[in-house]
Amino acid sequence: MGGQACVFYGAAEFSRDADLVIVSNPKNLERLRAALGELGATRIFVPELTEEFLRRGHAIHFRCTASEANRIRVDVMSVLRGVDSFDQLWQRRTTIADDAGNQYDLLSLADLVQAKKTQRDKDWPMIARLLEANYAERKEAPSAEQIRFWLREMRTARYLIEIARRFSSAAAKIAVERPLLQHAIAGEAEALETALTKEQAAEQKRDREYWQPLLAEIQQLRRAGR
């Protein structure tokens, strides 16, 4: 659900972390603990790996010590802000295979973009790269769903203007839910850039507010641990 997924989608990012979203139930956590054991992974922060913490939205962090994965960090979550339940994510997943026949289940691109809408400034250029790569790959013969996805999520002003020009009817409809598209329809690049910046700031504020009670809980756990 993180940098490794972005690499698979063609938006290269250097990352030594493996971010996973999992279904949180006893059987699956047992399987996860066994896998972490094979990797020599130890928990590096609070909280502990439990259903309770995962279901409340916490991330659980591990560091691997096995030789083939030495120092790689594994971060595990079960609930993501603004993203659907695991069952829905699993139904929409993208499955790809490498040349050796290994299969990888990724968040769908739309879900990955949503998960990347965090308070961290570094995540927003990655969202832009993911969408740019998807547009470059699919722009010649896009589906109606693909066009709606670009109009709702694209963060690059010049591409938004191009898409709004090519698919003006769809742009007019989606502008009702994303008003900044009015600037794209009018070809107002400077105003569109400003609106995109404001949109990002509002989303980052929502993410900070979401994490405030969870961070307070983590601080309490740290004090209790000391």
Image: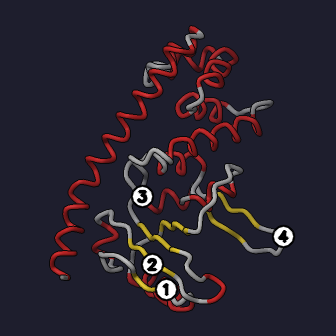
Kind of residue indicated by mark 2: Phe
- Which one is earlier in the sequence, the residue at label 3 or at label 1? 1
- Residue bearing the label numbered 2: 62
Disc 1 versus disc 2: distance between alpha carbons? 6 Å
Name which of mark 2 and mark 4 comes first in the sequence: 2
57 vs 8, left or right, is left
- Per the model, the C-alpha gap separating discs 3 and 1 is 27 Å
Q: Neighbour class for label 1 at 10 Å: few (<14), some, many (≥20)?
A: many
Q: Nearer the viewer, mark 4 or mark 3?
A: 4
User: Is 129 drawn above or below residue 185 in the view shown?
Assistant: below
The percent coordinates of residue 146 (x first, y second) are 65, 35
| Label whose residue precedes the other's in the sequence (1 or 2) | 1
- Of 50 and 38, nearer the camera is 38
According to the image, label 3 marks what residue?
Answer: 85
Q: Say whether marks 1 and 4 touch (CB < 8 Å).
A: no
Nearer mark to the viewer, of 2 and 4? 2
| Residue at mark 4 | 99
* Measured Cα–Cα span from mark 1 to mark 4: 27 Å
Which of the marked residues, 3 or 2, is nearer the chain's N terminus?
2
* Residue beneath the point at 77% across and 39% down: 137
Q: Position of residue 217 (x, y in %)?
A: 20, 66
Q: Is mark 1 in CB contact (under 8 Å) with mark 2?
A: yes
Disc 1 residue type (three-letter): Ala
Q: Earlier in the sequence, mark 1 or mark 4?
A: 1
Give the residue pinned by disc 1.
41
Give how far apart the Cα atoms at labels 4 and 3 are. Answer: 31 Å
Image quadrant where one finds the C terminus: bottom left
Residue visible at 28% across and 65% down? 56
- Which quarter of the rendered picture does the N terminus lie within? bottom right
Q: Which of pointers 4 and 3 lies earlier in the amino acid sequence? A: 3
Disc 4 residue type (three-letter): Asp
